[in-house]
């Protein structure tokens, strides 16, 4: 992958991430998140990790962003004055942290440190190899993540449930 293509995609991903935090409209934030997810999918495709790229598009860019938009439309997207003040603070913090991260990347590139080669997925990232690793070596973290997601789902159902007082008759 050429460094210019990587830099352009990294800039788009960074601008999308800043847009998620800096946007005052929740729908615009979700659309910036979609741009960020799509950029990461392109990264995966360029790194010959087609399975991860497709999963990124289907799960994150498809399902998660649609879920966020559904929730925003369901609960309403109005922003109060208190939320606006907090959002400004978060926007400034995001810009400062992004600048620090960019500085760290530039220092890392400028130091000419030897690149460390990451160990790829076994079997060159095939679905069978990823599944075999996931359900043998990483079965405990996989199951713990499923329990965490189940607890989050049940918590959302409990919080969304309307309270109906019982009357004694």
Image: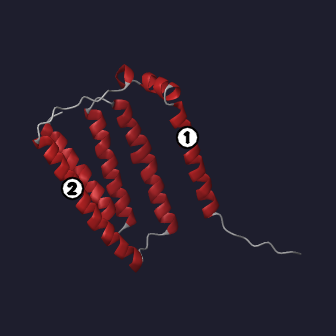
Q: Is residue 50 above or below residue 75?
A: above
- The image position of residue 162, as x and y in percent, is 66, 67
Q: Is residue 43 above or below residue 165?
A: above
Q: Nearer the viewer, residue 69 or 7?
A: 7
Quarter holding the N terminus is: top left
Label 2, residues with CA under 10 Å away: few <14, some 14-19, many ≥20: few
Q: Which residue is mark 2?
A: 100
Seen as rendered, the residue at the extreme right is: 169
Does dot 1 land on a helix, a strand or a loop? helix
**Quick check: 126 left or right of 158?**
left
**Quick check: 39 left or right of 125?**
left
Q: Is residue 7 visible?
A: yes
The answer to which image quadrant residue 163 occupies is: bottom right
**Quick check: 165 left or right of 15?**
right
Q: Which residue is mark 1?
A: 144
Using the numbered discs, state the Cα–Cα distance from disc 2 to disc 1 in whole angstroms.
33 Å
Q: Are marks 2 and 1 in contact (CB under 8 Å)?
A: no
- The image position of residue 130, as x and y in percent, is 43, 26
Q: Is residue 23 visible?
A: no
- The image position of residue 118, as x and y in percent, is 29, 30
């Amino acid at each position: 992958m050429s460094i210019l293509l990587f830099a352009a995609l990294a800039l788009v991903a960074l601008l999308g991430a800043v847009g998620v935090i800096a946007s005052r409209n929740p729908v615009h934030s979700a659309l910036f998140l979609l741009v960020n997810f799509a950029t990461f999918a392109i990264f995966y495709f360029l790194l010959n990790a087609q399975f991860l790229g497709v999963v990124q598009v289907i799960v994150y860019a498809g399902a998660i962003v649609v879920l966020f938009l559904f929730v925003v439309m369901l609960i309403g997207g109005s922003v109060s004055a208190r939320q606006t003040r907090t959002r400004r603070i978060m926007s400034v913090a995001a810009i400062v942290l992004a600048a620090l991260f960019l500085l760290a990347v530039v220092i890392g590139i400028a130091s000419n440190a030897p690149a460390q080669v990451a160990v790829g997925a076994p079997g060159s990232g095939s679905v069978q190899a990823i599944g075999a690793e996931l359900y043998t070596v990483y079965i405990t973290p996989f199951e713990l993540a499923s329990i965490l997601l189940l607890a989050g789902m049940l918590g959302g159902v409990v919080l969304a449930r309307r309270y109906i007082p019982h009357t004694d008759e």
